[in-house]
Image (tube, rainbow, N blue to C red):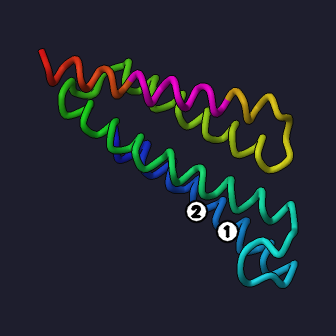
Amino acid sequence: MTPIFTAVLLLLVTLLAINVSALRIRLKISLGDGGNKTLGKAIRAHANALEHCVPFILLLLFREQQAGCTRELVAIGAAFVLARVAHAAGMLGGPFGLRRLGASLTIVLELWLTLALLRSALA
């Protein structure tokens, strides 16, 4: 199950990178954001996705090794994908509530998996 969520999350990261590249080409800005707020948001949306997806994928992989592929892990993985899509949409100009919801759910799911890993490893 982890390979599927890894592929979906890294597809999201790749789409966000393509968005940054397309904006750079359109705006003719090769480095940094050139003071352009739209490009700055796109850069942060991409970086933020990467900053959260990679650690989450590792957490998911280790938890799957501990517990196997459970319905709980599938639900957590699916919720995380939705959280990251909501966060990216909110970052790129959607309602701020989407960004807040995505960020909050991301943190809750990361903590949930971290604590589950620790609880199982220390038992």
Up the image or down, 48 lies above or below 24; here it is above
For this view, does 38 lie left or right of residue 17? Answer: right
Residue, disc 2: 14
Question: Residue placed at 14% from the left, 20% from the top?
Answer: 122
Up the image or down, 85 lies above or below 113; here it is below
Tell me where residue 11 appears, x and y as whole percent.
54, 56
Tell me where residue 69 appears, x and y as whole percent.
28, 28
Is residue 103 a member of the stretch shown in magenta?
yes
Tag 2 and tag 1, C-beta contact below 8 Å: yes
Question: Residue placed at 37% from the left, 19% from the top?
Answer: 71
Judge the density around disc 1: few (<14), some (14-19), many (≥20) Cα neighbours within 10 Å. some
Q: Nearer the viewer, residue 61 or 99?
A: 99
Q: Nearer the viewer, residue 4 or 121?
A: 121
Up the image or down, 50 lies above or below 119; here it is below
Query: Seen from this angle, which residue lies furthest left?
Result: 123
Amino acid of disc 2: Thr
- The residue segment tinted magenta is 102-112
Is residue 99 a member of the stretch shown in magenta?
no
Residue, disc 1: 18
Q: Main secondary structure of the magenta part?
A: helix
Question: Where on the picture, by quarter, is residue 76?
Answer: top left
